[in-house]
């Protein structure tokens, strides 16, 4: 049986490798970048992207004396409806770039042109992580590259630190310097000079909220706060800006730069540069922050502060655009706060009670979901897949509570309902372009109306009560922003002319503007004074009036009657709905930004503006173009020593990692040897090979060893030879719904223990197993949860062992159900398993093993 088995499995392995040998990626290469893209419709963006890359890299060369140790791989993607960027120096320098416009809610991330901004930011990450010292270069040479940590070989973490130590600095460290530099590189447009960041810390001081120390930020601040991981940006930016103000920008650069005299650990380097410990300076920053924000609060209180009445007993975390239902006297909004699952909810303005209308299974961090309200049809429109992927359009009937999805993958947001004909206006993001679209009843098709040129984006739409006008906030490629009005009949005829109502300076956006019930005024918010206040714009007089003077910030106003407004007031725990009086404030106070203080004291940051990327001549920097052949691009990435356990002895060897630049083909080989004389000679050599290329996985072992066998009685190491092929297929990927199938065939020879069970002897040493499995999951968790808190998982599997032409089939099923308890982050899970095996009950091939805690000692026997 041995020869047919090996030939059969090798044939499968060869077939699966060849079937997807070439991916549909193309590339453009410069001396320092390899830009990959998979869709020819994205190619129009590439010259601009390359200009931005070269322009930013040129700046970092001068500022940090940095030369890339290898070309930086840039992958151009359109997988989500909003843009994103991500950079890593492991396993090599690479950058992922989502080409769509960014989300502008609350001005959490003010930017100028998005490619220019993302290159400024992400290349800072590359420099801060990749730039080596002499010892870094030695270890990279020793291990044939930068080592990526892997779970199966924990020693790789140590080797990875030796080759790339700054990768292991906390996230706030990396985001702090990236945001600090992005702001000055963009000429002052960025979060170091952003109103949202300033508001967050002003609210903390006003509310006597706890400002996390270094350890607390990583352990609690990124889990229990409603802003979760975004706190790394907020705290990192704030602390680095404080250091820049106190010690000067050059000192900040000295801390982040890597030279041959730099300390390996970022905390030790801090001590070397600033002459004090990181913990002590962090404490001094917190004291300074309290003084600075108290001065800002005192400045705001020079004029009367807007009084308001809270409409909820507690903060609602993040909130979407909201709508007031005057008949039911409730507010409709999507909300998301720690300890509770995200939902579409109604908030009773008289009693403050919050009632769930529909689940929101895929919320975004800040805007939760896009929402629109049709008061005539008594319907709410909302989007799902808000955190990733392409958004769907859904409708909930407020009379019956029934919710349904009407458009899958519509890619639309910034919804606004036209009460005149019940259609929905929206903005679609696709291929890097924003398009105004309309979805008429019965809401089964999207009608494009007006595509905008690249560099222009429209957001915060609203339709006038009479259905004649559409308003929105327009942002241009240079970062300037306008509140504009368009005639709907002109749009329908393809005319793109619009009326500019208000123009705002850079770093200031017109947000959340909506029509009054009579259509004569607009209400919205802006950080015009440094604080997000509510403004009223009279469409007849063309006059803008402030109608609040607040201490933190008001957002998403909704006119109520003739003299009142509902808005959301910012607090340290999220947004609280409040009722305020509609009255004009002739005097409102401004605040001072930390970034302003940095510029005033250290004007050198003005010289850090990178300038226009148009000065880069693309034809002069591009050195190659072509199709990417990923299999032939596989290369050795690293080699490093490993230690493994085999039965009760130690083996020593090497691990070899191979992969292509797009990381679509991944190989790794472990080879080790046990010198222990207690082992027979044919068990001293240990080999394993793993290959993965979606949807295939191949694994082969010879006397398989395992690192974790060194530390407990449960042994996964196995004598003998194995070869297996696995195929994965996804039938449904609609978060949080997921339905996957798995097929695999594995052959074994020379085994003395069964491959899947703990130390169970094998009655035969040669056999083949065939597996098939189907798994479904619907899992949800609230902000800050450690694990899933609610949902269902179901699995159905079969295993057939073929031994000397005799089959031993088994089937098994698992079903888990979990539900939340009233106590935050508490839930109960009911778990069940069942199975049945055919064949000789005395045979080890009919055994089942249910359960396991994943602990080597607890799971023993």
Image (cartoon, rainbow, N blue to C red):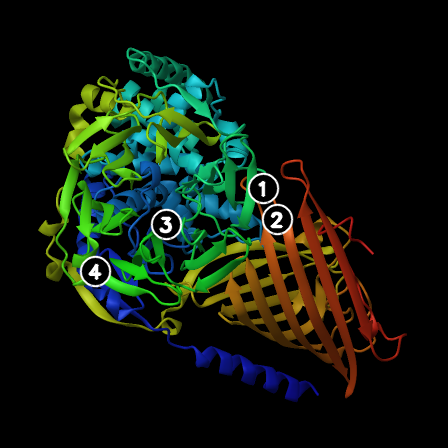
Which residue is denoted by mark 4 in the rendering?
450
Q: Residue at x 19, y 36 (%)?
A: 506
Front one among 509 and 253: 509
| N-terminal label among 3 and 2 | 3
Which residue is denoted by mark 1 in the rendering?
785
Give x and y (percent) for residue 621: 15, 58
| N-terminal label among 4 and 2 | 4
**The image quarter in which residue 766 lies:** bottom right
Give the distance between the C-alpha atoms of the residues marked 1 and 2, in whole angstroms: 7 Å
Of badges 3 and 2, nearer the viewer stands: 2
Which residue is denoted by mark 3 in the rendering?
86
- Disc 4: CA contacts within 10 A as few (<14), some (14-19) or many (>=20): some
| N-terminal label among 4 and 3 | 3
Of badges 1 and 4, nearer the viewer stands: 4
Q: Which residue is drawn at 18% across and 41% down?
A: 482
Which residue is denoted by mark 2 in the rendering?
788
Give the distance between the C-alpha atoms of the residues marked 1 and 4, in whole angstroms: 42 Å
């Amino acid at each position: 049986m041995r020869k047919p088995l090996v030939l059969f499995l090798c044939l499968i392995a060869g077939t699966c490798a060849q079937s997807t040998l070439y991916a549909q990626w193309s590339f453009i290469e410069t001396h320092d970048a390899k830009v990959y893209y998979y869709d020819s419709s994205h190619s129009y963006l590439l010259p601009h992207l390359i200009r931005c890359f070269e322009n930013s890299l040129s700046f970092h060369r001068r500022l940090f004396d940095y030369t890339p140790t290898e070309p930086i791989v840039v992958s151009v993607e359109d997988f989500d409806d909003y843009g994103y960027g991500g950079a890593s120096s492991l396993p090599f320098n690479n950058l992922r770039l989502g080409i769509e416009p960014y989300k502008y809610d609350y001005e959490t991330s003010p930017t100028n042109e998005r490619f220019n901004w993302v290159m400024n930011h992400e290349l800072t990450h590359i420099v801060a992580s990749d730039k080596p010292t002499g010892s870094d270069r030695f270890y990279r040479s020793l291990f044939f590259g930068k080592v990526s940590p892997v779970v199966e070989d924990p020693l790789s973490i140590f080797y990875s630190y030796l080759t790339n130590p700054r990768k292991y600095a906390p996230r706030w460290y990396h985001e702090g310097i990236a945001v600090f530099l992005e702001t000055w590189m963009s000429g002052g447009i960025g979060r170091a000079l952003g109103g949202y960041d300033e508001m967050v810390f002003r609210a903390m001081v006003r509310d006597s909220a706890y400002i996390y120390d270094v350890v607390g930020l990583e352990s609690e601040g990124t889990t229990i706060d409603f802003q979760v991981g975004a706190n790394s940006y907020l705290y990192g930016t704030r602390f680095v800006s404080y250091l820049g103000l106190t010690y000067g920008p050059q000192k900040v650069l000295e801390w982040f730069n890597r030279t041959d005299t730099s300390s390996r650990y970022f905390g030790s380097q801090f001590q070397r540069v600033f002459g004090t410990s990181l913990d002590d300076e962090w404490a001094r920053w917190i004291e300074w922050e309290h003084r600075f924000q108290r001065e800002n609060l005192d400045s705001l209180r020079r004029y009367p502060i807007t009084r308001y009445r809270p409409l909820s007993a507690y903060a609602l975390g993040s909130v979407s655009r909201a709508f007031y239902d005057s008949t039911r006297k409730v507010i409709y909004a999507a909300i998301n706060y720690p300890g509770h699952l995200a939902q579409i909810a109604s908030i009773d303005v008289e009693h403050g009670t919050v009632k769930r209308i529909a689940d929101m299974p895929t919320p975004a961090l800040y805007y939760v979901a896009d929402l629109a309200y049709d008061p005539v049809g008594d319907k709410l429109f909302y989007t799902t897949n808000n955190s990733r992927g392409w958004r769907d359009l859904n409708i909930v009937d407020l009379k019956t509570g029934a919710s349904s999805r009407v458009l899958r993958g519509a890619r639309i947001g910034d919804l606004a309902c036209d009460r005149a004909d019940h259609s929905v206006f929206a903005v679609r993001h696709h291929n890097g372009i924003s398009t105004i679209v309309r979805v008429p009843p019965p809401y089964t098709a999207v009608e494009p109306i007006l595509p905008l040129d690249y560099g222009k984006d429209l957001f915060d739409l609203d339709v006038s009560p009479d259905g004649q006008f559409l308003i929105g906030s327009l942002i241009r490629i240079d970062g300037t922003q306008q509140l504009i009005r368009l005639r709907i009949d002109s749009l329908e005829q393809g005319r793109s002319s619009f009326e500019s109502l208000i123009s705002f300076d850079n770093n200031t956006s017109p947000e959340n503007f909506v029509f009054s019930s009579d259509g004569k005024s607009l209400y919205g918010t802006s950080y015009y004074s440094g604080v997000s206040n509510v403004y009223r714009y009279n469409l007849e007089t063309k006059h803008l009036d402030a109608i609040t003077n607040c201490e933190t910030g008001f957002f998403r106003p909704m006119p109520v009657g003739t003299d009142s407004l509902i808005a959301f007031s910012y607090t340290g725990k999220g947004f609280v709905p409040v009722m305020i009086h509609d009255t004009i404030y002739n005097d409102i106070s401004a605040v001072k930004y930390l970034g302003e203080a940095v510029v005033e004291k250290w004007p050198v940051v003005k010289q850090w503006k990178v300038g226009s990327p148009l000065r880069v001549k693309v034809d002069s920097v591009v050195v190659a173009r072509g199709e990417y052949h990923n299999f032939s691009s596989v290369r050795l990435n690293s080699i490093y020593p490993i230690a493994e356990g085999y039965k009760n002895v130690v083996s020593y060897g090497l691990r070899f990692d191979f992969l292509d630049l797009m990381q679509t083909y991944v190989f790794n080989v472990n080879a080790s040897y046990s010198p222990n004389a207690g082992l027979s000679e044919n068990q001293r050599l240990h080999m394993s090979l793993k290959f993965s290329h979606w949807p295939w996985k191949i694994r082969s072992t010879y006397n398989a060893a395992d690192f974790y066998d060194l530390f407990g009685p449960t042994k996964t190491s196995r004598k003998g030879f194995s070869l297996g092929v696995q195929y994965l297929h996804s039938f449904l990927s609609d978060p949080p719904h997921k339905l996957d199938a798995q097929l695999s065939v594995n052959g074994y020879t020379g085994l003395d223990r069964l491959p899947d069970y703990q130390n169970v002897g094998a009655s035969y040493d040669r056999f083949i197993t065939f597996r098939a499995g189907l798994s479904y999951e619907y899992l949800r968790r609230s902000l800050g949860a450690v694990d899933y808190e609610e949902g269902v998982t179901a699995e159905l599997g079969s295993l057939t062992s073929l031994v000397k032409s005799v089959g031993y089939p088994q089937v098994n099923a698992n079903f888990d159900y979990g539900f939340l308890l009233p106590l935050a982050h508490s839930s109960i899970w009911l778990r069940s398993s069942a199975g049945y095996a055919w064949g000789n009950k005395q045979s080890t091939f009919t055994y089942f093993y249910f359960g396991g805690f994943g602990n080597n000692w607890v799971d023993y026997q």
